[in-house]
Structure formats: structure tokens, C-alpha cells
Image (cartoon, rainbow, N blue to C red):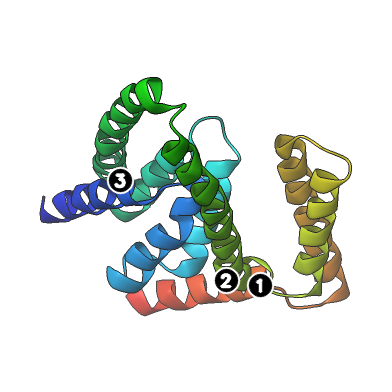
Amino acid sequence: MKLLFQIFLTFFKLSPITFGGGYAMIPVIQREVVEEKRWLEEEEVTDLFALAGSIPGAIAINAATFIGYRIAGITGAIAATIGVMIPTFFIVVALSIFYVFFSGHPKVEAAFEGIRPAVVALIVFAAFKMRKSAVVDKTTFAVAAAAFMLLLFFRFHPVFVIALGAVSGILLIGIKDRLGIETAVDDHEQQIEYFMGADI
């Protein structure tokens, strides 16, 4: 019960201070969950954010649900989801009312001029932090570069880019396995075998 309350409180606390949407939340959640609370490893959080961004719905809520589930199962998912939704709901209602009355005010417009680039900086910082666990070799760098090009120049839908990334990962790992080249997947399997053996 204590863990569930901590999960709820963590996401309740993070939700109102992470302006800029779900992607802007990534570095804050990563620092809290990985570095402060030590609930998950950085690679796990990166995978969960990738999964949260590849399915329909708000990435912040999806990520909170996945992370909560990974920490404490279904009850953890519920605690994290409720925690992240409550402040967001009331903030959105308050800002909507505020925007209706003050949207044309020069100072409000000036504030948004500063908020927009700050949000971009948060998203870039999140990508920079995630690169350590996502881009681990030349192969993953090539996949990341190809995905970036498809999004920027060919305007592929993100869902197709994610699907192509999954297919390319399966194909490239399969080719490396046939060539006898060790991959990050092999390292992960070895770690699982080690810990399972340690538990026996």
C-alpha cells in the first residue's frame, strides 16, 4: 500500500510541473523513477516511453500507466494513471477559462513566445537523455537516422515509422545472429539467465 501511495504521489507531483506535454515529461520522469526512486533501469523507461508513444492516446498518461504497471502491476498502473490525470484535468480547465478571457492580451502572447522554444528545448533534452539506451551501436544509429529522414523529408506517419523500426530491428538482429555478431539482445538474455540462475 505504501508503494502504491508513493507511485500516486510521484506522478501527482510530476504532472503539474512538466509543461510541454508527454515528451517534455520524459527527462523529469526518468530522473524521478530511475535516479531518485530507483524503481526501474534507464533502458526499461526508454522502452516504456517508446511503447507509450507508439499507441493511441496521450503519451503522458500512457507512459504513467506502463511505468506504474511495471513497478507494481495493475494497481500500480491505476495509481500512476490517477496521479498524473488529476492535476492535469484541473490545470486544463483553469487554463481554458484563463485563455478565453485573456488570449488576446499582449503579455499572454509574449509569454507564449517564450514557452514555445522552452518546450522544444525540453523535448530535445529528452531525446538527448534517451540516446544512451536507444542508440547503442552503428546499427541503431542508422535506424534512428533513417527514421528521422522519413519523418522530416518524406513526412511518413509516425505509426509507419515505428512499425518500420520494429521490422528493421528484427531483420538486423536476425542477420547479426546468423553472422555470429553479439548484440544488445544477447547481452540482455545473458543478464536474464544470470539473475534467474541466481534465484534458484
**Residue at the (79%, 45%) spot, across then down:** 151
| Residue for badge 2 | 188
Which amino acid type corresponds to the residue marked 2 in the rendered image?
His
Place of residue 53 in the rendered image (x, y in percent of width and height, measured from the top left): 57, 43
Labels 2 & 1 near each other (Cβ < 8 A) = yes
Q: Quadrant of the C terminus?
A: bottom left
Crowdedness near tag 3: few (<14), some (14–19) or many (≥20) residues, C-alpha within 10 Å: some
Which amino acid type corresponds to the residue marked 3 in the rendered image?
Pro
Q: Specify which label sits upstream in the sequence, 1 or 3.
A: 3
Q: Which mark is residue 184?
A: 1
Crowdedness near tag 1: few (<14), some (14–19) or many (≥20) residues, C-alpha within 10 Å: few
Report, in whole angstroms, how far the alpha carbon at label 2 lies from the one at label 3.
35 Å
Q: Which mark is residue 16?
A: 3
Residue depth check, mark 1 versus mark 3: number of the one nearer the observer: 3
Q: Specify which label sits upstream in the sequence, 2 or 3.
A: 3
Q: Quadrant of residue 136?
A: bottom right
